[in-house]
């Protein structure tokens, strides 16, 4: 690995938006055959930096050099031509097109002005063979698994002869087995001489796959180190700018009477005879592998999907809950797994998103009382430390952590007694996670009941009072005390 001329060198990158200084002279180096972990809190500037590299944003100042030569990357085509490919967390695929069609979209293989499908198919097959995987080349991408859609994105990068590949939260929606396969592909790409920038909030992955780490905070580079010369505690401290003694804040809450009782809940093969109870002041974790029926179960409780059988009681009273409106009226709030598709209207302002589930008390005679809405949302901004330049900022412009806080704010304003957190910290940095954990502790201390779905077992063990394990739509076991439970015990039931 030559150190004389980095494969990529970004120097003094500056980028600002109205009211926000996103990047303040950031430096970044990437060498041939290296995996560089780019770390930082939500809003630290990671996304802005890779959008500058990908040509989506034009830097206000700074230089970019590839192989030691100054290379202006003022547009996505220029970036691709320079050998840079960015695989964003939200895939850039056309759902109705096949893998082959997506790979060569905009760079079709033609002869005499006509697309040569046979040659495209052969090239696509060769690309996947290079990756050591097989996928259905003829299936529309919407029918592929998340892992296979990611492989299509990687194949697109290889088809462009990319030498620098940026992966933004590539493991966020993958199972542990799929993550292991992804790492094998990354190592193979390293051996082929490519440089990989790997963005993740999962620090365990960083220590598994990265060679070096670069840490951003508030738009500045605050640390750069070989992975072997830095530990988890040091990374967290540099990311948040303060010492976090514990990743999971302690909680001492007296657990009370049952708030929510679910018995015999059923819907097809996804939820089969699920029963459990959640009490006042308690955090109950639902865990299991992807596809175990966790999200499907809480959607039935929230009335988002019709149930075939089962009974739901709130504070001892039977409730029908045939719609989300009925669940909200009964005091249930759901923070959905996919905040971008189901939790927020990204094209609307954060103020409007805050108001959506609260119109019953924010509106009068069919009109929203804007002054009251702004006042209540301003309190939430201060309480949750939401980083937003103004209340009219579009929700889609916020970082993942701040988007999650807006979702939290709208449900807290409803003063729900039962809160369902579906993957509450997915794609969120350790600092924002800690703030959400503190908030969860405050909520249960106030007598709320929380159901938490999480795929991260350390989070389950660190935050839950009790743990319910699901497998193929059934409850396979319960641990009454999370403090005396191990990850191995949970996994034994998760794969039962």
Image (cartoon, helix red, strand yellow):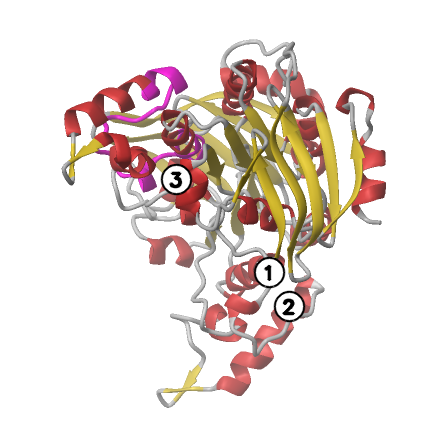
Residue position marked by numbered label 1 in the rendering: 151
Question: Magenta span has 395?
Answer: yes
Question: Answer yes or no: do the residues labelled 1 and 2 have beta carbons within 8 Å?
Answer: yes
Instruction: Measure how far apart labels 3 and 1 are at the Cα level.
Output: 28 Å
Instruction: Measure how far apart labels 3 and 2 are at the Cα level.
Output: 31 Å
As drawn, 158 above or below 478: below
Precedes in sequence: disc 3 or disc 2: 3
Considering the numbered disc 2 on the image, is that residue within a helix, a strand or a loop?
A: helix
As drawn, the label of residue 480 is none
Residue situated in front as seen by the camera: 339 or 397: 339
Considering the numbered disc 3 on the image, is that residue within a helix, a strand or a loop?
A: strand
As drawn, 440 above or below 99: above
Q: Position of residue 287 (x, y in %)?
A: 69, 39
Instruction: Measure how far apart labels 1 and 2 are at the Cα level.
Output: 8 Å
As drawn, 317 above or below 179: above
As drawn, the label of residue 128 is 2
Precedes in sequence: disc 1 or disc 2: 2
Q: Position of residue 485 (x, y in %)?
A: 82, 26
């Amino acid at each position: 690995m030559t150190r004389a001329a980095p494969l990529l060198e970004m120097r003094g990158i500056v980028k600002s938006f109205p009211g926000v200084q996103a990047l303040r002279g950031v430096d970044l180096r990437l060498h041939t055959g290296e995996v560089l972990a780019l770390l930082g809190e939500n809003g630290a500037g990671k996304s802005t930096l890779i959008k500058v590299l990908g040509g989506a944003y034009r830097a206000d100042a700074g230089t970019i050099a590839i192989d030691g030569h100054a290379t202006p990357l003022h547009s996505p085509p220029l970036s691709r031509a320079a050998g840079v490919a960015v695989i964003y967390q939200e895939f850039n695929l056309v759902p109705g097109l096949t893998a082959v069609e997506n790979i060569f979209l905009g760079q079709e293989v033609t002869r005499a002005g006509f697309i040569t499908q046979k040659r495209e198919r052969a090239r696509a097959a060769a690309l996947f063979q290079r990756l050591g995987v097989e996928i259905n080349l003829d299936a529309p991408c919407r029918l592929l698994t998340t892992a296979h859609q990611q492989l299509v994105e990687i194949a697109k990068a290889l088809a462009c002869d990319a030498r620098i590949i940026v992966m933004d939260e590539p493991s966020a929606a993958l199972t542990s087995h799929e993550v292991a396969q992804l790492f094998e592909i990354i190592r193979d790409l390293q051996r082929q001489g490519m440089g990989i920038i790997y963005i993740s909030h999962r620090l365990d992955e960083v220590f598994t796959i990265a060679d070096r780490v670069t840490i951003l905070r508030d738009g500045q580079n605050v640390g750069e180190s070989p992975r072997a010369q830095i530990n988890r505690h040091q990374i967290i401290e540099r990311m948040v700018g303060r010492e976090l003694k514990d990743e999971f804040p302690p909680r001492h809450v007296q657990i009370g009477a049952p708030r929510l009782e679910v018995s015999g809940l059923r819907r097809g093969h996804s939820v089969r005879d699920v029963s459990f109870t959640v009490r006042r002041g308690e955090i109950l974790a639902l865990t299991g592998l992807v596809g175990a029926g966790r999200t499907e179960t809480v959607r039935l409780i929230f009335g988002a999907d019709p149930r075939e059988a089962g009974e739901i009681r709130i504070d001892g009273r039977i409730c029908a809950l045939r719609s989300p409106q009925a669940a909200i009226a009964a005091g249930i709030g759901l923070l959905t797994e996919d905040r971008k598709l189901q939790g927020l209207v990204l094209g609307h302002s954060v103020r409007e998103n805050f108001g959506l589930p609260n119109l019953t008390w924010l509106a009068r005679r069919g009109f929203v009382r804007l002054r009251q809405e702004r006042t209540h949302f301003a309190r939430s901004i201060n309480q949750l430390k939401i980083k937003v330049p103004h209340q009219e900022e579009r929700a889609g412009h916020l970082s993942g952590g701040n988007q999650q806080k807006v979702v939290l704010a709208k449900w807290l304003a409803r003063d729900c007694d039962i809160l369902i957190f579906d993957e509450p910290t997915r794609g969120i940095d350790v600092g924002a996670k800690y703030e959400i954990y503190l908030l969860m502790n405050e909520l249960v201390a106030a007598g709320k009941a929380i159901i938490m779905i999480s795929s991260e077992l350390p989070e389950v063990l660190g935050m839950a009072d009790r743990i319910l394990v699901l497998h193929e739509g059934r409850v396979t076991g319960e641990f009454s005390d999370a403090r005396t439970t191990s990850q191995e015990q949970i996994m034994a039931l998760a794969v039962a």
